């Protein structure tokens, strides 16, 4: 993940504060809402990490063929990642 977990916690607190201040949400327990926002942000940000891990597994399976054909690893990584991003309908 590109952001530290501490920063994600900060983002969750700030998002929760702004949602409450804008009267977009109403809650009796700010910490509970903050924790749910934190979990949602972590889940969303970790999606790219999971996609990258899946790309590495796929490319590892085809490493011999890629080496024989002289395929560029970085280029193949981008192509496979692009396909998986479309498959999961993710926005990265």
Image (cartoon, rainbow, N blue to C red):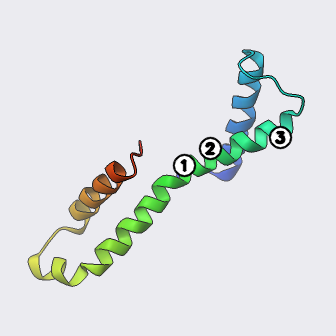
Crowd rating for badge 2 (residues with CA inside 10 Å; few <14, some 14–19, many 20+): some
Identify the disc placed on residue 41. Answer: 2
> Which residue is labeled 1 in the image?
45
Residue 16 higher or lower than 58, as above or below: above
Q: CA distance from mark 1 to mark 2?
A: 6 Å
Indicate the position of residue 42 as horizontal and vertical percent values. Answer: 62, 49
For label 3, the residue is 32
Answer with the quarter of the image where residue 16 lies. Answer: top right
The Cα atoms of the two marked residues, 1 and 3, are separated by 20 Å
Badge nearest the viewer, 2 or 3 = 3
Give the Cα distance between marks 2 and 3: 14 Å
Residue drawn 24% across the image and 78% down it: 62
Location of residue 66 with respect to 26 vertically, above or below: below
Dot 1 and dot 2 residues touching (CB under 8 Å): yes
Residue at (59, 51) in percent of width and height: 43
Q: Earlier in the sequence, mark 2 or mark 3?
A: 3
Circle nearer the viewer, 1 or 3: 3
User: Does 72 sit above or below residue 17?
Assistant: below
Quadrant of the rendered structure where residue 11 is?
top right
Left or right side of 84 for 40? right
* Crowd tier of the residue under label 3, counting other residues whose Cα lies within 10 Å: few below 14, some 14–19, many 20 or above: few
């Amino acid at each position: 993940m590109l952001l530290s977990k501490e920063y994600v916690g900060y983002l969750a607190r700030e998002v929760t504060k702004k949602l409450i201040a804008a009267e977009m949400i109403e809650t009796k327990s700010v910490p509970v809402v903050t924790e749910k926002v934190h979990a949602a942000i972590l889940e969303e940000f970790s999606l790219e990490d999971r996609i990258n891990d899946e790309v590495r597994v796929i490319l590892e399976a085809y490493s011999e063929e890629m080496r024989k054909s002289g395929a560029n690893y970085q280029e193949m990584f981008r192509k496979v990642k692009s396909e998986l991003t479309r498959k999961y309908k993710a926005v990265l």
